[in-house]
């Protein structure tokens, strides 16, 4: 790609001895100025390198200060051999300046020297961050980071992963730290959270069908700085795989990390080759005293608990005893320093033994070991002449932690750590549950959504503290680089796992959704999806809105007919979430488990759909725009074939003209032979109602009979379906029955009195 040459023709790393004798225009910042009287020199710097500029016309230097940004036109020359600068790639050449243009001027003294900015106090560096970033060491870190990210992105793409940028402003998804929150200007009192990790989004991608996802993900965690953790914000290589085993994830991690470290590690460093060592959590805690072991340290921890239960040394009896062997005897001063370190980390002391040339022992606890057991100790610990062994005794968890710290300290003091090496390993088989020593209750050790090894059978049959999870960490040189898990994708396993952790059924809330693939195929053919508990979803969502906005009432428009069972003489109601029963259940649940003071009710509960239809018929301006058809909703029309369409047609018929009905629905539904069975289901001629949100059987029969009366009073011919209806027993049952719906009032309602008054004023009731 050709770029403008107005300010420069090339960057400083592109200038070489091949350009000697050629005219070049370069640009950058003045790093140093050296005035030698008849000739002056400037070290020019850009982000790629440094080039010496020579000015034999010293007037060119006039007005130029350090850190000015300049553009220089001149000729590339060979430097005298005695003036070579081997520290820079351009150390054998220089540019003789013919003209200089100042692009950016420094008007005040610099707050610090660029070359020494890393030695300046941090607040001053950050105040003048643009100057600090000019430091070649700081700039090189940025370039290094950019190169690593570019390599990671290339590598993940080569492995078949798709990069997805997930949202930054989101709902809270805690990862063990506090959230940063961002207030919304548009929605007063509302806040976004910054993601601690893209956990929710990447799992959404997996269940949506994305096979392999990755992202160089920004993470925000409002926590204190720790030696192994970045506070505030950081970026991580985040990836997820579908239909993958733990071993599949391990292979990807090995491929990416080994390649990245081999490419970017300092020269001479060794990197662990795949496959990485896989160490179980229990093994790691035993051998290294940590689930983040530094494998550069050759020292290993051994367990001697059983051995010391056979000895007379009471401080070690009935305790977990761990030991670390080193080669060679150490000075008294060394032992004193190790004892001091042990007490600083909370240990009561640090026992040791030294093995003499004759394999006898020397040390403070030698006398407590019976003679007949001394050979057994040598065998258990692998002791030989001139070895020293240290002992740590405490409760198991504390003993493991102390032993790990002693191991690290011995490795550092004895300079045992392998030089110039990156040693990787996987830690797996983490325990699924742990016992809280204070409460004596079982809880999750780490991620509660991990798959337990052994699945549901393990949860049902094993001691919870013995159950392992498919969780794993990647560790390098004693630092946890990453963690992951196989996700639990079974609701039954999830429910049982949470039950073990103390989440009782009455305190547990979960969503279960299954979808038969055959339904998708039927949907393509025009079949409806079936009923979803939409009203319940709205109710719980509205509860949050009401609480945040300090509102007392949640008002919905669920019909009284929603109380009626769909199946004859059975309590099967697909409209349960719209029913009075749900209304009562919801209010009771909210009051007992969430908060008191918010009331949920349906304003339509006291009245019938017959009354609503009568009232609607007086509002002709809405005839053309109202819709209540699920099948035609995608095209914003009445389908004229479903139970919902026929019900609305029937319930409106007593109050509206036939021509108005035809204008709304496009045809006279009462003349359609194909809807005969549907009418039978709506009226109760057939026992079961359609699985649609339609009115009660009583309302339907009342509306039919009132329409028949209207037609006959006007000497109009009855439509096809009503001719048939007159031949049924339902006609005989309802034709002379009193119409109770003109002045209907349903007492099963939670409507506050002042809302009832509003309904009365509307003349609906």
Image (cartoon, grey):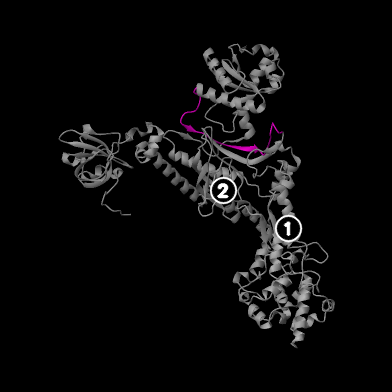
Query: Which disc number belongs to residue 583?
Result: 1
Q: Is residue 574 toward the left or the right of residue 158 in the image?
A: right
Please tell me which residue lies in front, 294 or 754: 754
Q: Is residue 261 toward the left or the right of residue 139 in the image?
A: right
Residue 257 percent across, percent down from the top left? 50, 41
Q: Residues within 10 Å of mark 1 (few under 14, many from 20)?
A: many
Residue 417 percent across, percent down from the top left? 50, 27
Q: Are circles 2 and 1 on residues that touch, CB within 8 Å?
A: no
Q: Earlier in the sequence, mark 2 or mark 1?
A: 2
Residue beneath the point at 49% across and 42% down: 233
Is residue 530 visible in this depiction of the protein? Answer: no
Give the mark count: 2
Q: Where is residue 93, by image quadrant?
A: top left
Residue stretch rendered in magenta on the structure:
414-439
**Could you say whether the residue bearing mark 2 is in a helix, strand or loop?**
strand
**Could you say whether the residue bearing mark 1 is in a helix, strand or loop?**
helix
Q: Is residue 69 toward the left or the right of residue 128 in the image?
A: left
Question: Which quadrant would the N terminus be assigned to in this image?
Answer: bottom left
Q: Provide the residue designation for mark 2.
A: 240
- Vertical comparison of 652 with 49: above or below: below
Residue 32 percent across, percent down from the top left? 26, 36
């Amino acid at each position: 790609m050709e770029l403008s040459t107005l300010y420069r023709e090339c960057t400083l790393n592109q200038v070489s001895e091949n350009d000697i004798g050629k005219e070049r225009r370069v640009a950058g910042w003045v790093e140093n100025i050296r005035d030698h009287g008849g000739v002056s020199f400037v070290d020019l710097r850009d982000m790629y390198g440094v080039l010496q500029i020579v000015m034999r016309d010293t007037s060119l230097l006039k007005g130029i200060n350090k850190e000015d940004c300049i553009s220089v036109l001149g000729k590339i020359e060979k430097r005298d051999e005695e003036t070579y600068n081997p520290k820079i790639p351009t150390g054998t050449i220089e540019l003789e300046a013919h003209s200089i243009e100042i692009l950016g001027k420094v008007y005040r003294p610099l707050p610090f020297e660029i070359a020494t900015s890393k030695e300046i106090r941090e607040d001053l560096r950050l105040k003048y961050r643009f100057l600090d970033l000019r430091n070649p060491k700081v700039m090189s870190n940025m370039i290094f980071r950019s190169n690593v990210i570019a390599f990671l992105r290339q590598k993940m793409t080569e492995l078949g992963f798709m990069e997805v940028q997930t949202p930054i402003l989101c709902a809270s998804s805690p990862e063990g730290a506090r959230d940063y929150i961002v207030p919304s200007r548009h929605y007063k009192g509302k806040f976004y959270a910054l993601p601690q990790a893209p956990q929710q989004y990447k799992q959404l991608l997996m269940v949506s069908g994305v096979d392999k996802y990755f992202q160089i993900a920004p993470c925000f965690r409002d926590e204190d700085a720790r030696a192994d953790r970045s506070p505030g914000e950081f970026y991580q290589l985040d990836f997820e795989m579908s239909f993958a085993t733990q071993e599949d994830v391990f292979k990807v991690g090995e491929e990416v990390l080994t390649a990245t470290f081999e490419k970017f590690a300092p020269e001479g460093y060794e990197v662990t080759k795949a496959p990485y060592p896989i160490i179980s959590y229990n093994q790691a805690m035993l051998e290294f005293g940590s689930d983040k072991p530094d494998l550069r340290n050759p020292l290993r921890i051994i367990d001697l608990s059983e051995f010391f239960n056979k000895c007379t040394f009471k401080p070690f009896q009935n305790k977990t005893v761990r030991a670390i062997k080193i080669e060679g005897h150490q000075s008294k001063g060394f032992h004193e320093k190790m004892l001091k370190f042990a007490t600083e980390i909370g240990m009561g002391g640090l026992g040791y033994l030294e093995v003499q040339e004759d394999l006898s022992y020397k040390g403070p606890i030698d006398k407590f070991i019976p003679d007949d057991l001394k050979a057994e100790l040598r065998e258990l610990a692998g002791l030989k002449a001139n070895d020293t062994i240290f002992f740590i005794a405490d409760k198991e968890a504390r003993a493991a932690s102390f032993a790990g710290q002693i191991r690290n300290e011995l490795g550092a003091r004895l300079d045992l750590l392998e030089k110039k090496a990156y040693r990787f390993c996987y830690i797996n088989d983490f325990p699924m549950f742990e016992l809280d020593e204070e409460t004596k209750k079982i809880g999750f050790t780490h991620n509660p959504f991990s798959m337990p090894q052994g699945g549901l059978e393990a949860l049902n049959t094993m001691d919870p503290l013995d159950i392992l999870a498919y969780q794993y960490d990647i560790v390098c040189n004693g630092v946890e680089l990453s963690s992951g898990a196989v996700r639990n994708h079974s609701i039954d396993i999830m429910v049982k796992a949470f039950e073990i952790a103390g989440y009782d059924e009455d305190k547990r809330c979960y969503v279960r959704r299954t979808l038969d693939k055959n339904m998708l195929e039927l949907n393509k053919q025009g079949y409806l999806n079936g009923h979803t508990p939409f009203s319940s979803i709205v109710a719980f969502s509205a509860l949050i809105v009401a609480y945040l906005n300090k509102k007392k009432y949640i008002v919905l428009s669920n019909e009284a007919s929603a109380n009626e069972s769909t199946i004859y003489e059975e309590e099967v109601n697909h409209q349960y979430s719209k029913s009075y029963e749900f209304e009562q259940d919801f209010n009771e649940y909210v009051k007992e488990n969430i908060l008191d003071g918010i009331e949920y009710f349906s304003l339509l509960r006291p009245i019938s759909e017959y009354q609503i239809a009568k009232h609607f018929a007086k509002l002709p301006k809405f005839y053309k725009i109202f819709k209540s058809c699920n099948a035609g909703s995608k095209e914003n029309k009445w389908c004229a074939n479903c139970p919902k369409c026929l019900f609305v047609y029937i319930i409106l018929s007593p109050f509206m003209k036939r021509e108005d009905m035809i204008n709304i629905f496009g045809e006279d539904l009462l003349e359609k032979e194909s809807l005969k069975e549907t009418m039978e289901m709506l009226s109760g001629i057939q026992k079961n109602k359609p699985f649609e949100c339609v009115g009660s059987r009583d309302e339907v029969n009342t509306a039919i009979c009132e329409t028949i009366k209207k037609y006959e009073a006007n000497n109009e011919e009855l439509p096809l379906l009503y001719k048939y209806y007159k031949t049924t027993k339902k006609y005989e049952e309802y034709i002379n029955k009193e119409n109770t719906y003109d002045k209907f009032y349903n007492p099963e309602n939670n409507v506050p009195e002042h809302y009832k008054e509003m309904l009365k004023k509307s003349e609906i009731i």
